[in-house]
Image (spheres, grey):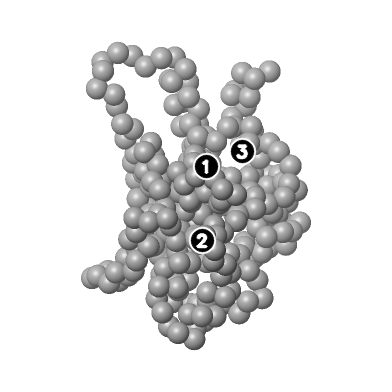
């Protein structure tokens, strides 16, 4: 990723190299390059929240461990940790080091933002805003927490501020128009049911208060451990457990008709 300067400030663009963040052909979503234990770039990434099975959103144990993310290693070269890169940047001022951090976390941050705002254009804009805020405020990173935790805290603070502004100045919401097949043939019943389910899940997520939605996004969709999720949101572990429980209870109430189909 490179940083370019324009009329609106810094703009992140992508390199065509081994650190490229692929874009889903279906949703247009930016996704992480998968961590390698010799896995190939381009392996299937996490889907948008609407694609995630209903059971995974509304059920499960919040005490399950985090999804471990490994940093790919270059052949024959040790990979610097986030903290080492930041230390080098503070000494040298080389912006290429910030680009490396952005390459590591762009997909993860964007994936965290989308289910909070449920709009691709807003998610893209907020992803750029998060990295601008983070890099401008890098002096505030003191190393007491991992850089990833600090960055995700910046991410969620940015999202909560955005949602608060929208609540104060509401505008009519226009759902994104899905791509339609050129064929005039009616879609199969399974496709219609899947589209209905996806719409219901997104609508249910949208109906949750931001704090409850964040609890589901962090722990269920992003597989972040409850303790770290609590640090990101600036609350106690007990409060985070309550938010997860309350969010799942509300989602189950809204989506009960779909659960009945599995019984």
Give the side of residue 219 with respect to residue 40, left or right: right
Q: Nearer the viewer, mark 1 or mark 3?
A: 1
Q: Which residue is mark 3?
A: 57
Of labels 1 and 3, earlier in sequence is: 1
Q: Residue at x 38, y 46 (%)?
A: 23
The quadrant where residue 140 appears: bottom right
> In front: 212, or 104?
104
Q: Is residue 183 above or below residue 209?
A: above
| Residue 74 - label | 2
At which x and y percent is residue 119?
40, 46
Q: Residue at x 31, y 31 (%)?
A: 179
Q: Secondary structure at mark 3?
A: helix
The reply to whether discs 1 and 3 touch (Cβ–Cβ < 8 Å) is: no
Q: Residues within 10 Å of mark 1 (few under 14, many from 20)?
A: some
| Residue 46 - label | 1
> In front: 164, or 81?
81
Q: Label 2, label 1: how many angstroms apart (C-alpha)? A: 24 Å
Q: Residues within 10 Å of mark 3 (few under 14, many from 20)?
A: many
Q: Residues within 10 Å of mark 2 (few under 14, many from 20)?
A: few
Q: Is residue 172 above or below residue 75?
A: above
Q: In the rendered view of the protein, which quadrant contains the C terminus?
A: top right
Q: Residue at x 52, y 74 (%)?
A: 85
| Residue 197 - label | none
């Amino acid at each position: 990723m490179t940083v370019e300067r324009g009329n609106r400030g810094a703009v992140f663009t992508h390199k065509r190299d081994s650190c490229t963040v692929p874009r889903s052909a279906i949703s247009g979503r930016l996704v992480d390059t998968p961590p390698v234990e010799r896995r190939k770039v381009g392996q299937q990434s996490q889907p948008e929240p609407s694609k995630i099975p209903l059971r995974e959103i509304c059920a499960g144990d919040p005490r399950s461990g985090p999804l471990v993310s490994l940093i790919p290693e270059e052949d024959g070269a040790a990979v610097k940790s986030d903290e080492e890169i930041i230390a080098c940047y503070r000494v040298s001022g080389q912006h290429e080091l910030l680009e490396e951090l952005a390459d590591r976390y762009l997909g993860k941050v964007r994936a965290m933002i989308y289910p909070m705002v449920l709009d691709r254009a807003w998610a893209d804009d907020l992803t750029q805003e998060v990295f601008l805020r983070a890099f401008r405020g890098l002096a505030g990173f003191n190393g007491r927490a991992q850089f990833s935790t600090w960055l995700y805290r910046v991410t969620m603070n940015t999202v909560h501020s955005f949602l608060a502004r929208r609540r104060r100045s509401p505008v009519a919401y226009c759902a994104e128009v899905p791509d339609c097949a050129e064929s005039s043939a009616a879609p199969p019943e399974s496709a219609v049911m899947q589209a209905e389910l996806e719409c219901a899940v997104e609508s249910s997520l949208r109906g949750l208060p931001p704090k409850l939605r964040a609890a589901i996004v962090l722990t269920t969709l992003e597989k972040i451990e409850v303790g770290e999720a609590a640090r990101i949101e600036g609350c106690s572990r007990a409060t985070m457990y309550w938010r997860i429980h309350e969010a799942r209870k509300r989602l189950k109430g809204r989506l009960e008709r779909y659960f009945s189909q599995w019984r």
